[in-house]
Image: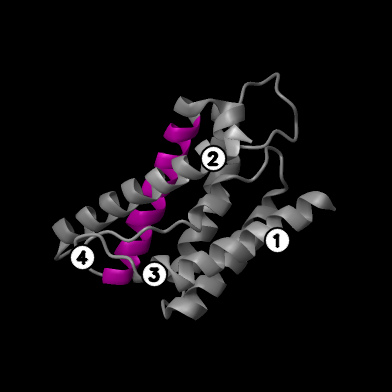
Amino acid sequence: MARLVNRLGMFVVLLLVQVLVLNHVWLLNVATPLLYVYFAVTFPRNTEKGEVLVWCFLLGLFIDIFSNTPGLAAGALTLIGMIQTYLVELFVPRDSAEDLDVSAATLGWGKFSTMSSMLLLVYCLLFFLLEAFNFFDWQLWLLRSVCSAALTLVLMLAIESVRSKR
């Protein structure tokens, strides 16, 4: 029950921060932080795949509703939810707890950063590809994807740094 309340709280906080603050941040008119992806990255090990997909779809749907991006965030975040369950198994030691929380403190900074950057890059590539819906301006699409993923990763690592000090 406590885990459900924590996830719901994180869902609401990341949704509000993204919609009210981060959607209005454009670094050099290229990158915007997409911090809500942090929600999908941090699902504990062995969380039911269906549960992860439903949570990710709902967060993406609410982001889409409030950001006027019909289906972009929902589709891309659902894909990340699907990939995350398999990717966690590659980075988590086999002898670790079944319900291990995915964080820099439990995985280590290197593994957490690598896993997060892989998920963020896939998310940003898909999100901005769907937004542009063409390959003609691929340099801008690739630049926005990489810069947004890097900016989001910096924010995620900052949050992990604060969380690990507690």
Give, as a three-letter code, the residue at label 2: Val
Mark sitting earlier along the chain (1/4): 1
The residue wearing badge 4 is: 29
The residue wearing badge 2 is: 162
Q: Which mark is residue 138?
A: none
* Residue 129 in the image, given as x and y percentages of width and height: 30, 63
Q: Nearer the viewer, residue 69 or 137?
A: 69
Could you tell me which residue is drawn at 40 percent across and 45 percent down?
A: 153
Q: Nearer the viewer, residue 37 or 130?
A: 37
The residue wearing badge 3 is: 23
* Residue 18 in the image, given as x and y percentages of width and height: 47, 66
Tag 2 near tag 4, CB within 8 Å? no
Mark sitting earlier along the chain (4/3): 3
Could you tell me which residue is drawn at 37 percent across and 62 percent down?
A: 127
Could you tell me which residue is drawn at 77 percent across and 49 percent down?
A: 3
Kindly report the distance in space between the C-alpha atoms of the residues bearing marks 2 and 3: 23 Å
Kindly report the distance in space between the C-alpha atoms of the residues bearing marks 1 and 2: 20 Å
Kindly report the distance in space between the C-alpha atoms of the residues bearing marks 1 and 3: 21 Å
SS label for mark 4 = loop
Residue 110, relative to residue 128: is it above or below?
Answer: above
Give, as a three-letter code, the residue at label 1: Leu
Kindly report the distance in space between the C-alpha atoms of the residues bearing marks 1 and 4: 32 Å
Residue 136, relative to residue 123: is it above or below?
Answer: below
Kindly report the distance in space between the C-alpha atoms of the residues bearing marks 2 and 4: 28 Å
Side of 112 relative to 142 (left or right): right
Side of 133 relative to 84 (left or right): left
